[in-house]
Image (cartoon, coloured by chain):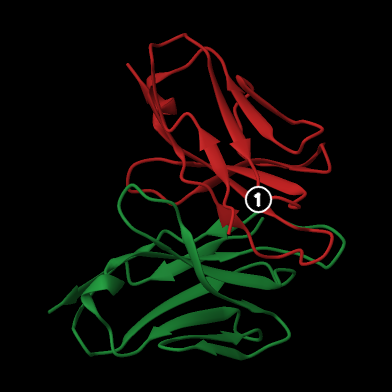
Amino acid sequence: AAGVIQSPRHLIKEKRETATLKCYPIPRHDTVYWYQQGPGQDPQFLISFYEKMQSDKGSIPDRFSAQQFSDYHSELNMSSLELGDSALYFCASSRRRLAGYEQYFGPGTRLTVT
Amino acid sequence: GENVEQHPSTLSVQEGDSAVIKCTYSDSASNYFPWYKQELGKRPQLIIDIRSNVGEKKDQRIAVTLNKTAKHFSLHITETQPEDSAVYFCAASESSYGGSQGNLIFGKGTKLSVKP
């Protein structure tokens, strides 16, 4: 079965640079979530989109923005990167209209800020 | 907002023994409680979930129980195997069919080690 796709898988950036992470949800899934997971930490919710509209907002810094496109893929844009932004970034998707519950995670993007 | 507490933070068992991980939540509006297994550097994998209208759910060696009154839920793994070794996260959210679907609030995780 098709899974959530994330790109790139690894990304190395310097402080103050920008980064764009991409997420392609499972086909027919209409909701995308972004989570940030620091080393040894639990995943922290950043932001979600349903039918291309922002649905919920969590602990997402103002330096970050995100959107969902007409093909349901989503991008997380991160500017003025800081050392503390180094983490695993997961995208998850679900099919809210029918099932509404299960969230399936992508493989993640490991961002390292030097 | 919702707060999820998870215990223990580490758990070591012998192969074949049972393992139990417990979580409590604070928001009575939460109605969906999944459990994820995460191996080092990998994605969280959904292993079992339970909704607030159900008290218990079982899938082979894994079972989850929910006590809505006490606001706690537990994961039970029987006949543990070395490949069960991983970090397990509980989570809670408020979700509804065709309507709002909340983000997941995770517990801090339990590192399970199964010794052969």
User: Which residue shows up at 70% across the image and 50% down it?
Assistant: A27
Disc 1 residue type (three-letter): Ile
Q: Which residue is mark 1?
A: A26
User: Which residue shows up at 45% across the image and 80% down it?
Assistant: B75
Which subunit holds the residue at mark 1? A
Residue found farthest to the front: A1
Q: Quadrant of the N terminus of chain B?
A: bottom right
Q: Position of residue B61 (x, y in %)?
A: 40, 88
Q: Quadrant of the C terminus of chain B?
A: bottom left
Residue found farthest to the top: A16
Residue found farthest to the left: B116
B58 vs B32, nearest the viewer: B58
Residue A85 in the image: above or below residue A79? below
Residue found farthest to the right: B98
Q: Position of residue A65 (x, y in %)?
A: 67, 24
Residue B82 in the image: above or below residue B93? below
Which picture quadrant has residue A72? Answer: top right
B66 vs B18, nearest the viewer: B18
Q: Relative to B81, is B53 on the left or the right? A: right
Q: Position of residue B37 (x, y in %)?
A: 41, 65
Chain B's colour? green
User: Which residue shows up at 53% across the image and 64% down it?
Assistant: B4
Chain A's colour? red
Q: Position of residue A89 (x, y in %)?
A: 49, 37
Q: Secondary structure at mark 1?
A: loop
User: Which residue shows up at 65% across the image and 64% down it?
Assistant: A102
Residue B104 in the image: above or below residue A113? below
